[in-house]
Image: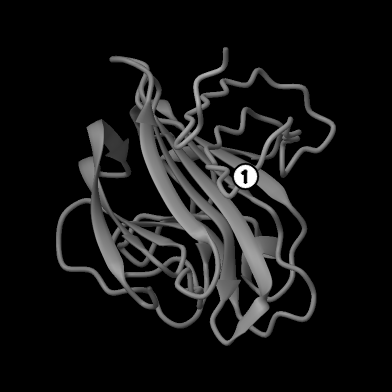
Amino acid sequence: CDDCTEVLQLGFAFPFYDEMVNQVTVTSNGLVHMGTGQHNNGCCSGWSLPSSQGPSIHLIHSDLHPGTHGDVRYHTAGTEPNRTFVLSFDNVALFGNASIQVDGQLLLHESDGRIELYHGGVPTGAYNIFTMGINAGDGVRASYDPAFHQTSSTSPAHFEWEPTLDGYQSGPNGWPYSWTGDTTGTYLYTKSISGLSGTGAWSVQLENEFETSATLPVDLNLTFHGLHQPI
């Protein structure tokens, strides 16, 4: 759909600036509103941060159209108290330009309140404006890399924020979070593969989309539909 929103339950309470959040409102434009309330769809451009439009995480916020191409998936992995909420934008097309597609993933960690953002970069030729970062919603506090703030072209990156003790001011705009910047990390990703038919063997290649040289453990679940049981 285009310019739509959906409320999702995290499955646990997550600290975000001054609030404990149990649900998020995900927009098709790569903007995630934190907590309850009536929220807009984030059309049609990445916001300038800090913003007073409510607490939010800007995964890959722009003018996107999953209805044209791509998927938006989510799940909560793990068990209490080590659960992780995972939201993935997979090959989502830009509105009005389906030939340009973007990827992103948000991880919210129950155990320590960490926030991770992954994104596959924005190729040159996109006229859309993108923003990646976190925003307290009070018009004062936000944290982001300027190279990934209201930009039309970026490289792939991984950002991580960790809550600091006692509200320690870790930066001019980012408190109470410390920001580790562009670092390596574990990319939790789910993708379904369909359309296989006929007889014989199929080869499926698994790779880390944002860190092509990374070696990570993989959980592979296979579900067969409409196939005869092997003899």
Q: Which residue is mark 1?
A: 197
Visible residue check, residue 59? no
Where is 67 relative to 75, above or below? Answer: below
* 56 relative to 39 in the view: left or right: right
x%, y% of residue 218? 63, 21
Color style of the picture: one colour
Which quarter of the image is occupied by the C terminus? top right
Q: Residue furthest right?
A: 213
x%, y% of residue 219? 56, 20
Visible residue check, residue 154? yes
Where is 228 relative to 94, above or below? Answer: above
Identity, as a three-letter code, of the amino acid under mark 1? Ser
Q: Residue furthest left?
A: 37
Where is 81 relative to 66, above or below? Answer: above
Q: Nearer the viewer, residue 172 or 45?
A: 45
Which residue is found at the position 65% from the left and 17% from the top? 217
Q: Nearer the viewer, residue 197 or 209?
A: 197
Residue 69 falls in which quadrant of the image? bottom right
Residue 159 falls in which quadrant of the image? top right
Q: Nearer the viewer, residue 5 or 219?
A: 219
x%, y% of residue 31? 42, 63
Q: Nearer the viewer, residue 35 or 206?
A: 206
Which residue is found at the position 74% from the left and 64% from the top? 154
Which quarter of the image is occupied by the N terminus? bottom left
* 96 relative to 136 in the view: left or right: right
Where is 83 relative to 51, above or below? Answer: above
Which residue is found at the position 73% from the left and 34% from the top? 202
